[in-house]
Amino acid sequence: MKKATLIAAICGLFMGAQTLAAQETAQELTYVSDPSQGVLLNRMKDNWFITAEGGASFYLASKSIHRSIGDRFMPAASIYAGKWFSPVFGARIGVNYLGLKGLATGPEYIGVLQGEPLVDGKYYKTKYAEVGPVFDLMINLTNWWCGYKPGRVYNATLYGGAGAYFTFTKHYKNNGENDGWKGAHNDILNLRLGLINSFNVTKQFAISLDLRFTGMDGLQNTGGAGWNNKYGSIQAYLGFTYNFRKRDWTAPVVPVCPEPENCDALRARLAAADARIADLEAQLKDCLNRPVETVVENKGPLATVYYPIGVSRLSRENQRVVKAIAYVMTQNPNQKYVVTGWADNYTGTDNINIRLRKNRAEGVQKLLVKNGVAESQLTVTTNNGNLSDLGEKCVALDRAVTIEEAK
């Protein structure tokens, strides 16, 4: 088997198998959205949400450790509007309320409660609230690590952000009477870091447990005894989220080919095809390793000089050809050559054709010798057959002298 034929057979087998498989499964293909293949970003108006949450705040400060743990909790609450830009990244902005209970070393500090007993005989109880705008960037860790999956119940979301708080405290008149909550003229920057544990109840609603740490700058703006210490708060919130349309993410549509109920026949055909492929590969390997046969090409005449009917004398053009041949011969003095005279057998008599063959060959020999070719290099002969033997219409090809290298 020739190499080209063998390679073509292998290619045909592969293409035939693929075509057959395509024909058998074409009617069974279905198309579904597959989030594992990635997601497509939605429009700007999609994937918005609002969240309301309430919980408790536990104050962290250097002096607050002297206050009992149970007396350091205060309510906290937030409300947010946000958007998911992808299944992983989102942002929200809102307002946060944070109640704080601590201790101070003097009655002039912000939030000191008048009339309260001292703690350890030297610390004044404080109570104030922080309210202000906040902003968070969010990363859905579940979708990031596990891939986006519609209908997932639990999602863990890490977030970090910043905000500005305005402080409100209990205000007292000169007679010590409680005058209610008033602004304390104290502006505070804060940094936040938290983890939202969200549980989807429906596509629209989710409940969450938000665990957060907030670090605050305690610099007082005006009046009284100020401080520039840093302090913080740990909070836990129970939240409720409403997701606006559109709530999910569009996934690429991919074809699905269902598994046939019984694959034994296909497996048998596949095994037979594998065996056939292995056999063809073995034949191809043997063919490629087979020694290449050396083909001996038969060289044609070094030159052929043609004559008109009944002519044995060389024309001027043919003389130039013979002179060129003589030059080639003189460059190869060890090579022998055979000069053969021809005439067609369709015209003239035998005697005329015999004479034409002889005269034509001898005329070429003489001109070659005249132009420097040694007579010992030449063998002059005639051939009574037809040179081309292509029929009477091609007799012009039979009136010639051929010059060939002797074998």
Image: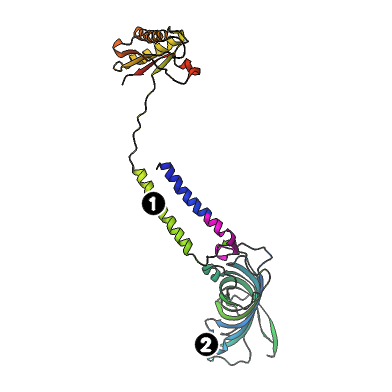
Name which residue type carries label 1: Asp
Q: Which mark is residue 279?
A: 1
Q: Who is closer to the viewer here, 341 or 40?
A: 341
The structure residue drawn at horizontal position 46% and vertical position 17%, both measured from the top left corner, is 397
Is 403 located above or below residue 72 in the figure?
A: above
Task: Give the structural element (helix, strand or loop) at label 2.
Answer: helix
The reply to whether residue 62 is visible in this rendering is yes
**Quadrant of the image for the N terminus?**
top left
The image quarter containing residue 114 is bottom right
Q: Is residue 331 above or below residue 313?
A: below
The Cα–Cα distance between marks 1 and 2, rounded to whole angstroms, is: 88 Å
Q: Nearer the viewer, residue 388 or 350?
A: 350
Residue 235: mark: none
The amino acid type, in three-letter code, at marker 2 is: His
Tell me if label 1 and label 2 are in contact, CB under 8 Å.
Answer: no
Left or right: residue 387 compared with residue 211: left
Residue 329, magenta (yes or no): no
Residue nearer the viewer, 371 or 108: 371
Colouring: rainbow
Q: How dense is the environment of label 2, judged by Cα within 10 Å: few (below 14), some, or many (20 and up)?
A: few
Crowd class of label 1 (few under 14; some 14 to 19; many from 20; radius 10 Å):
few
Q: Which residues are magenta?
A: 20-40
The residue where tag 2 is placed is 66
